[in-house]
Amino acid sequence: MLKFNLSSFTARQELSLEITKDDISLDDTAAIEGPMLLELALTKDTETSVIVEGKLKGTLKVSCSRCLKDIKQDIESDFVVICKDKSRMTEEDVESDVLEYKDNELDLTEFVRETVLLEAPIKPVCDEKCLGLCPVCGKNRNEGDCGHKQETGFNPFSGLDIK
């Protein structure tokens, strides 16, 4: 779905696509929730390079990093990337993160996948006041007290408390 034949257009092509979880496989920390909107503008810069401008907007399903409850997280990202024919790639292009294509076929699947994962929150929480799971029994402490004391470990600075 995210493969484009570059020989089919001459100057500029604008596309609006819907991406689902079947189109892009994410790791097990996130999943696409519903369709994600991807707007692209492909512009031929030269005979062997294309500038891709895009906007990605949608919702991910992630787990709260404290209590493991599934939550929805909206993401939005604008990006610009230069793509160049593999046979014309230079060492400078590789260092500058220029994407390569081959035989006039540009595949943006991996690039879009990486963009989605980069926009996903690192430590998502369902609520800033989330209490997380009990380290003893594993009960969600947001749903009630399990009776286990929250023991603090050894603190070498506890004798330095200012009173």
Image: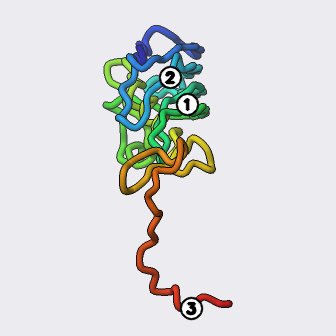
- Looking at the image, which is closer to me, 33 or 92? 33
Instruction: Please state the horizontal and vertical placement of residue 103, each as a whole percent of the image.
Output: 32, 19
Identify the residue at the far front of this view.
147
Asked which quadrant contains residue 11, the reply is top right
**Three-letter residue code for mark 3:** Leu
How busy is the neighbourhood of tag 2: few (under 14 within 10 Å), some, or many (20 plus)? some
Left or right? Give the position of 116 relative to 103.
right
Q: Position of residue 154 (x, y in %)?
A: 41, 79
Query: Which mark is first along the chain, 2 or 1?
Result: 2
Q: Nearer the viewer, mark 3 or mark 2?
A: 3
Give me the disc on residue 81: none
Indicate the position of residue 67 as horizontal and vertical percent values.
Answer: 47, 44
Residue named by callout 2: 33
Residue name at image x 45 percent, y 46 percent: 96
Say whether marks 1 and 2 touch (CB < 8 Å).
yes
Q: Secondary structure at mark 3?
A: helix
What residue sits right under mark 1 in the picture? Answer: 72
Residue occupying image coordinates x 47% and y 44%: 140
